[in-house]
Image (spheres, grey):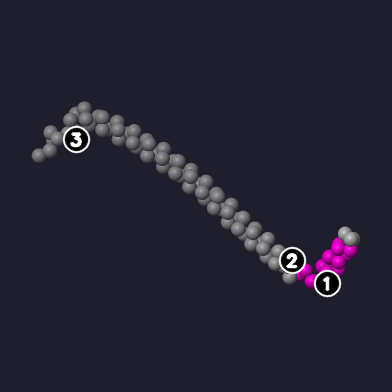
Amino acid sequence: MKRLATLALVLLAQTGCLSQFTSRLDRANDHLDYIRGELARGNAQLADSNERLRQMERHMEDMRQKMATMERFMKRFGAGTDAEAP
């Protein structure tokens, strides 16, 4: 029975009856390869964006610390108090 099915499949393949089906599969595989490439490119961009975000967060934390130091310094000398208001 398996031999008969295999023989029938071989005969159909040789006559071109499966060419429409196989061409559709080939197109679907090509499309999937394209989508896979797009996903890989998107993943790379996402990784790059995540790294830039981490850098910006570090920079913001550094600036916050510098501003806190400056604020403490200015409070020592009375800057930023109501005494300066006209």
Q: Residue at x 52, y 50 (%)?
A: 45
Disc 3 is placed on an element classified as loop
Q: Residue at x 84, y 65 (%)?
A: 9
Discs 1/3, front: 1
Q: Closer to the camera, 35 or 48?
A: 35
Label 1 environment density (alpha carbons within 10 Å; few <14, some 14–19, many ≥20)? few
Whole-percent x, y for residue 10 in the image? 85, 65
Label 2 environment density (alpha carbons within 10 Å; few <14, some 14–19, many ≥20)? few
Query: In the displayed structure, would residue 4 be above or below residue 67?
Result: below
The reply to whether dot 1 and dot 3 touch (C-beta < 8 Å) is no
- In the image, taking residue 34 as reference, residue 19 lies left or right, namely right
Q: Give the label on residue 22, or none.
A: 2
Label 3 environment density (alpha carbons within 10 Å; few <14, some 14–19, many ≥20)? few
Residue picked out by circle 1: 15
Is residue 12 rendered magenta in the image? yes
Sequence-wise first label, 3 or 2:
2
Sequence-wise first label, 1 or 3:
1
- In the image, taking residue 40 as reference, residue 11 lies left or right, namely right
